[in-house]
Amino acid sequence: MKKIMVTGALGQIGSELTGKLRGLYGAENVLATDLRKPAEGSSAENGPFMQLDVTDGERMHELAKSFGADTLIHMAALLSATAEQKPLLAWNLNMGGLVNALETSRELGLQFFTPSSIGAFGPSTPKHNTPQDTLQRPTTMYGVNKVAGELLCDYYFSKFGVDTRGVRFPGLISYVALPGGGTTDYAVDIYYKALEEGTYTSFIAEGTYMDMMYMPDALQAIVDLMEADPSKLTHRNAFNVTAMSFEPSEIGAAIQKHIPEFRLEYDVDPERQAIAESWPDSIDATAAKEEWGFKARYDLDSMTADMLEKLKAKLGK
Ligand code: AKB
């Protein structure tokens, strides 16, 4: 990776990924693009930025070409809960954006990355230690988009030789950018509310396990997979990656080790709860470990300590 274009660069992952890539490869070598304009003083402004609607394939191609990109990292997408509320918009944006990004990569010979998700699994998928290769019959629009996307990336590799790579991300937790419209968002909100109000009302029910990962591990996974020797990759797209699996009362207990008076309450949102219940409790990341050395550094306790420390500074607490 030397000249990288990132779509969705102002989103939850994109905003931190852009900074990491600029640190590794030079600010001038990473073009950040997003539908929105960056806020003044935002880190997206520490290097080139262009506005881009990913459903406009012609503009995407033109931007990548004039930048001289050799890599396209496609992050722009709607998350699970929003996609469930606006399924047609999700189809058009998630699938339209992806096919434009793959076409741009095919036409310009770019290396390509896009994330899939634990949302690509469904209720008939084995729930515990979900294998890399397994049943995928998701019941959400987001999941339908993710499975179709995984297959499309495989197709562009086998049919056109595009160097497509990707992972299935679990819920990602970060103190930098807030997620928006995801089912796993509670595991970010809880830290903010713990510091701001000392209490949090979870929209996910006690006992509902989902896989999670701290953002620094997620960013490193993208870099490691993109740098991996292609001859070692049996799978190319949709590698299961995870760092931990927990349910709301376990993250609550981890926070109480630092804030003993913290209280966790529940007001379950039936829509997001149904999505969570259709996903695995825990997935198996063996293929990612074996094929390109995936490793997560943070577990629930070390992530919680770091999150609370960084958020305290951010919120001036
Ligand atoms: C979501 O909750 O929609 C995302 C995901 C797991 O893909 N965080």
Image (cartoon, rainbow, N blue to C red):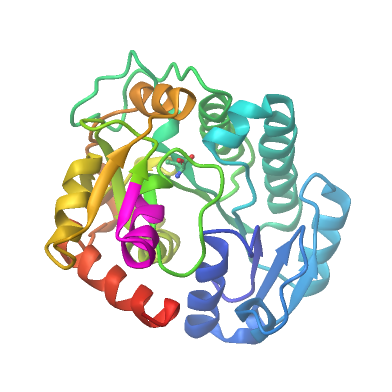
In the depicted structure, whether residue 71 falls above or below residue 77: below
Above-or-below relation of 161 to 267: below
Give residue 263's position: percent from left, percent from top: 23, 51
Q: Is residue 232 visible?
A: no
Query: Measured from the top left, where is residue 115 in percent x and y?
Result: 50, 47
Nearest the viewer among 47 and 57 is 47
Which quadrant of the figure contains the C terminus?
bottom left
Main secondary structure along the magenta-highlighted residues:
helix
Quarter-wise, where is residue 120 in the image? top left
The quadrant in which residue 26 appears is bottom right
Q: Is residue 266 above or below residue 77?
A: above
Q: Is residue 306 visible?
A: yes
Is 198 on the left or on the right of 20, as rendered?
Answer: left
Magenta part of the chain: 187-200
Q: Residue at x 38, y 33 (%)?
A: 267
Q: Position of residue 215 (x, y in %)?
A: 38, 63
